[in-house]
Image (tube, grey):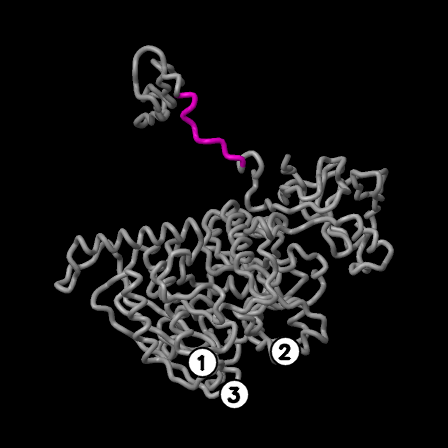
Amino acid sequence: MPLYALVDCNNFYASCERLFRPELKTRPVVVLSNNDGCVISRSAEAKALGIPMGAPAYQWEHVFRKQGIAVFSSNYALYGDLSNRVMSVLADMAPRVEQYSIDEAFLDISGIAEPLALCRAIRERVGRHTGIPVSVGIARTKTLAKLAARRAKKDASLGGVFDWTAAPDPEALLRETEAGDVWGLGRQCAKRLASRGVRTALDFVRLPADWVRKELTIVGLQTQLELKGVSCLSMTEAPAARRSVLCSRSFGQLIEEREHLREAVCAFAARAAEKLRAGGLEAQAVQTFVLTPRHRENLPQHQGQATTTLPGPTNFTPDIVAAALRGLDEAFRPGFSYQKAGVVLLGLESAVVRQASLLDLPPEERERRRALMRVVDGVNRRHGRGMLRLAISSAPDRPWHMRQHRRSPRYTTSWDELPRIGRKVQEARAAAAGTGPGNARRPF
Amino acid sequence: MRLRTNGLELLGPLDPADSGTTPKILLPLLLAGVQAGFPSPADDFIDKRLDLNEHLVPHPAATFFVRAVGDSMLGAGIHDGDLLVVDRAVEACAGRVVIAAIGGELTVKRLERKGDRMLLAPANPDYPSFDVSEREDFEIWGVVTHVIHKV
């Protein structure tokens, strides 16, 4: 019989921010999305203060200040590095690991003699080696493992690991779980279920399979079976092929000028094309979108988007940028203040196995373009992103660059930003005398 | 059974009867081709380059670099501005230089045991030692395994 474990990093971004700042261990911590927009990670203390996920930062600023909450801009260099460390410890200890997101991984532990002992050892080692606390849920199916990990996180008496297969009364556990909290159901689904009187995971399990299949498709049926302990979702070790490439960003300040938007869209399109080439892919269409800030009801709202079809599959930056800019001309309306723009590349296919077409450029020209892009990518890899770019895309001091006022140092990925440990003599004396800035601290 | 012939090393059973199945013979990678006479003296040097990571970072997932500030650990060879290699996978025991959290701050000190007391001791007579035996806000963060000092 299959057996899975889900390893879930507790409040991952907030935990990363705490690693080099022990004084934050008991303080509430929140991390804001790109551009300091809204709350995307909360420590347990911040949750207890009632700060919701997705809370817009500007609305909650007074609460942050009043409650002494430590607020951080997102620091993806740090989170990415610590995520890799966690995943590498998991890979050392478990036979098969499938990373599910930046802070979650499924382990296939079928046939392991003592799964509970292994998972406790994993939790202990990840914590000791990387400093990131994790919760582990063990179950016969991935969906139940998710629920088990939730429980492991919520109930402190479990010591961070919960084995669903050893639970004396699994039905009671399903009864305590809201249907909307089940992996694969989600809030939209939960609303539909609620209209049928289904509130808990147990109610959902008891629905007739025919109805579930008809109303919630095969995905709903799979979820139901998984909750009953029948494994439908196996380990998929190869990541699914990419369907699209997205590059978008919120701006540091609202943008009204078409020219500034053009620069931003051009940079996004160039970056997306670079991702495309890195994946050995070509795109057939380019979508451009622009958005005004949703939370500002007093501003006129506009969401514009336009898709441009390319004459043939390509990953040549000038083609993709030109298509994205044509899309922008359609999507843009004067008189609005835009907060976000993005470029999506669609209809991806492998650049190697492609069908020849009458519209194709002559082979010499294709090779010439490929060579040019290789040089551009090579230079940018060696000398930093954006070193070689189209003249239309801007220098990095433009207004649309991200706002990250409260980003912590890139402690683990930049030589100039390493954690500094210890104090200068004057500082230490001042602190010992209780006159310095750190007077609440020890005189080290 | 192992056999050496002309610089060729055969690993594994040579006699099929040994294993009962088709013998599996593992051949070592030959770097200079098969030749009679002396082995190429260059063989000894056809090796990958020395990588300092192997020496300094046996546990990559658990190793962090930090910058030392101040002179409280001069006696341990740690100068202001030095780079410290900190390995969280190494067990902290008395006598080792550690990064510890105390009073909400990270500090580098030597862990010392005096009878049943645990101390954080500087390696500089100008600084005092701290008894951390009963401190609830004390925690070992990692063990300093190397100091990288620019001369």
B103 to the left or right of A258:
right
Tag 1 secondary structure:
loop
Mark 3 or mark 1, whichever is nearer to me: 1
Left or right: residue B75 versus residue A62 is right
Amino acid type at image mark 1: Glu
Give the number of the disc on residue B71.
none
Can you give x and y, in whole percent of width and height, for residue A268 in the image? Answer: 39, 66
Question: Mark 1 sits on what residue?
Answer: A256
Dots 3 and 1 on the same chain:
yes
Q: Is residue A84 above or below residue B79?
A: below
Query: Does residue A194 appear to the left or right of B6 in the view shown?
Result: right
Q: Earlier in the sequence, mark 3 or mark 2?
A: 2
Disc 2 crowd, CA 10 A, few/some/many (<14, 14-19, 20+):
some
Q: For the residues tagged 3 and 2, is the chain the same?
A: yes
Label of residue A297 in the image: 3
Q: Residue at point 57% right, 69% down?
A: A32
In the image: residue B9, left or right of residue A5: left
Q: Residue at x 56, y 38 (%)?
A: B58
Q: Earlier in the sequence, mark 1 or mark 2?
A: 2
Chain at numbered mark 2: A
Q: CA distance from mark 3 to mark 2?
A: 16 Å
In the picture, the quarter occupied by the N terminus of chain A is bottom left
Task: Find residue A434 and report its horizontal and vertical position in percent.
Answer: 85, 58
Question: Which residue position is annotated with label 2?
Answer: A60
Q: CA distance from mark 3 to mark 1?
A: 17 Å
Question: In the image, which residues are magenta?
Answer: B43-52
Give the chain letter at badge 1. A
